[in-house]
Image: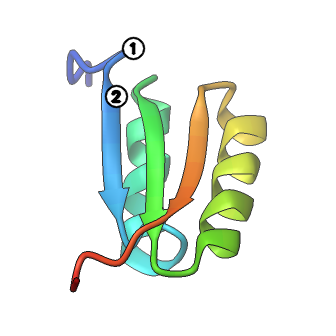
Amino acid sequence: MDLGIAGKVSIVVGGARGIGLAVARELAAAKARVVIADVDGSNAAAAADKLARESAVEAIGTAMDITR
């Protein structure tokens, strides 16, 4: 299914693991560029690096705490 998001930037909050990571993978499969934001910046960066290698899309990870 073509979601029409290829090349668009997506931001997944809490994307370093669990449901957030699954969402990031689906977005990457649709060829969207992915920003993984998580309270744990090192896990976000590691998840983004792995996602970029596996899916050949641009992905970055960053530390973000949306509760503040």
Residue 57 position in % (x across, y down): 60, 26
Image check: 57 left or right of 36? Answer: right
Q: Nearer the viewer, residue 22 or 52?
A: 52
Q: Residue furthest bottom?
A: 67
Compared with 25, 34 (above or below) is: above
Query: In the picture shown, does residue 52 fall above or below 43?
Result: above
Quadrant into which the C terminus falls = bottom left
Colour scheme employed for the rendering of this structure: rainbow
Percent coordinates x, y for residue 64 in the rendering? 41, 69
* Tag 1 residue: 7
As drawn, the label of residue 28 is: none
Depicted 57 relative to depicted 27: above or below: above
Residue at 32% from the left image edge and 38% from the top image edge:
10
| x and y, in percent, of residue 43 in the image | 66, 73
Amino acid type assigned to the residue bearing label 2 in the image: Val
* Callout 2 secondary element: strand
Residue 9: mark in rendering:
2
Q: Nearer the viewer, residue 40 or 50?
A: 40
In the depicted structure, whether residue 57 falls above or below residue 6: below
* Coordinates of residue 8 in the picture (x, y in percent): 31, 20
